[in-house]
Amino acid sequence: MEKLTFDQLRSTFIKFNEEHHVTQFDKTCMTGAIVFKPENWPDKNYSIEARTYEVSSANKYFIPGCGGNSIFANCADGSDNGVRLDWYMFDIETPWEIDYCYIINE
């Protein structure tokens, strides 16, 4: 597994989507994972699986010209599915900090 920054993951997803004409909810997409830093929850001890969210390149945020910024994801441990991840990453007073990302499949 090669660790990537979020910007690298985003660039990889966008390039793939452009080359393969991926649209929202498209099944022909890449999947990756975003791992959040444990420091986001100083009073809790979440496992790495609980801090990892699996995300598809078929989210609006990764599709140029789609007219949206949503990123829906599922927690790797199965405890939190369909999360509007972009709200936690960008739209709250204290956004979740990303540790690293990686590609699951191409």
Image (spheres, helix red, strand yellow):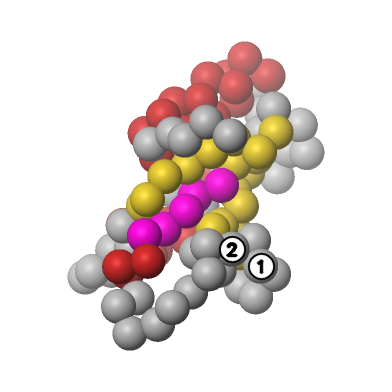
Mark 2 to mark 1: distance in Å? 5 Å
- Residue at (60%, 25%) from the top-left corner? 17
Contact (CB < 8 A) between labels 2 and 1?
yes
Q: What stretch of residues is rendered in magenta? A: 33-37
On the rendered structure, is 31 left or right of 36?
right
Residue 79: image quadrant is bottom right
Q: Position of residue 18 (x, y in %)?
A: 57, 19
Within 10 Å of disc 1 (Cα), the crowding (few <14, some 14-19, many 20+) is: some
- Residue at (34%, 75%) from the top-left corner? 41
Amino acid residing under circle 1 = Asp
Count of residue discs:
2
Residue position for label 1: 77
Q: In which quarter of the image is the N terminus?
A: top right
* Disc number for residue 49: 2
Amino acid residing under circle 2 = Glu
- Residue at (41%, 29%) from the top-left corner? 8
Q: In this view, does 46 lie above or below 72?
A: below
The local secondary structure at tag 2 comes to loop
Q: Position of residue 66 (x, y in %)?
A: 51, 37
Nearer to me, 16 or 6: 6
Q: Where is residue 35 in the image (x, y as percent from the top left)?
A: 47, 53
| Residue 64 in sight here | no
Q: In which quarter of the image is the C terminus?
A: top right
